[in-house]
Amino acid sequence: MTASPTLSPDPAAERAAPPPGRRFSLLAFARKHRTILFLLLLIAVFGAVNERFLTVRNALNILSEVSIYGIIAVGMTYVILIGGIDVAVGSLLAFASLAAAYVVTAVLGASPASWLIALALSSLVGLAGGYIHGKAVTWLHVPAFIVTLGGMTVWRGATLILNDGGPISGFDAAYRWWGTGHILFVPVPVVVFALVAAVGHLVLRYTRYGRQVYAVGGNAEAARLSGVNVDFIVTSVYAVIGALAGLSGFLLSARLGSAEAVGGTGYELRVIASVVIGGASLTGGSGGVGGTILGALLIGVLSNGLVIMHVTSYFQQVVIGLIIVAAVAFDHYARTHKA
């Protein structure tokens, strides 16, 4: 009885078969590109519903709106990467911009340098406010949510006290240019947003400081044992987001022609949503500025599309809130069901 010959594997079939672990996974692809896929879907839907949505003018309107809270979202990326949170950014934006406008109009009047003073003051006031938040977190060991929740109330109250709840206007043309002007055909706030996002990305990805931010978010104690000054990193990211809130406040006041005590109301939701929808983990250590930009654009497109469809702003808040929950839930599902 002779043994049957052993069949050798077909080399061509072996080359055609995908290597282990390299097979295409629809879930993994959707998780990796979920923000841009949803963004493209929204653009297609709103473009089909209303032809005005796909015009250049409307696109610039969306970018102008996104740029104000998108600048703060770049800073929020750093905060969430270390496992923190900041719900005071809207109130701090209002206080910083109103404080700067108060000094400019009451002291400088129509000085040609009023915009420069306002820009510097608004950013510095925001930086100081963020620094206070960071120090409260590191020195008092109070959770960041509690610190910034208190800050949200304190800064909004201080804003209302500063000018009895009234707006401050009367800015000159040079000041207004920062909110309404153009560089070539691009609105100035969009250019500022692009520069802030570029710097934020480069620092986060290609500097020692950026690596330390990721390390603190991944495991703060391990980072500390590795020689990272965790308290400095934590304090600095809150100072950075504070400064960016002040910068956004300056641009918003220039765009509206007045600094208002109610300015920035609800911005904390949009800013946090931009980062979370962009793929950052609320537990820290995962995310990036690129994803945050896509998240901010998604919210801007959604809000603009709903306005074009005559949907009220109240319903927009409901939709954004549901998207935040869905984004976090999908991320958790994809992490626990890797294909």
Image (cartoon, rainbow, N blue to C red):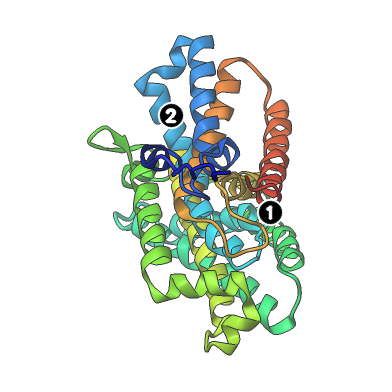
Q: How many marks?
A: 2
Q: Please indicate, yes or no, whether residue 284 appears anywhere in the rendered image.
A: yes
Residue at horizontal 47 percent and vertical 68 percent from the top: 124
Q: Quadrant of residue 155?
A: bottom right
- Between 123 and 329, the residue placed more toward the observer is 329
Residue at horizontal 45 percent and vertical 40 percent from the top: 17
Q: Please indicate, yes or no, whether residue 102 appears anywhere in the rendered image.
A: no
Residue found farthest to the left? 184
Residue at horizontal 36 percent and vertical 38 percent from the top: 12
Sequence-wise first label, 1 or 2: 2
Q: Amino acid at mark 1?
A: Leu
> Element under label 2?
helix
The residue beneath circle 2 is 61
> Element under label 1?
helix
Residue at horizontal 45 percent and vertical 70 percent from the top: 210
- In percent of width and height, residue 301 lies at 52, 29
Q: Quadrant of residue 89?
A: bottom right
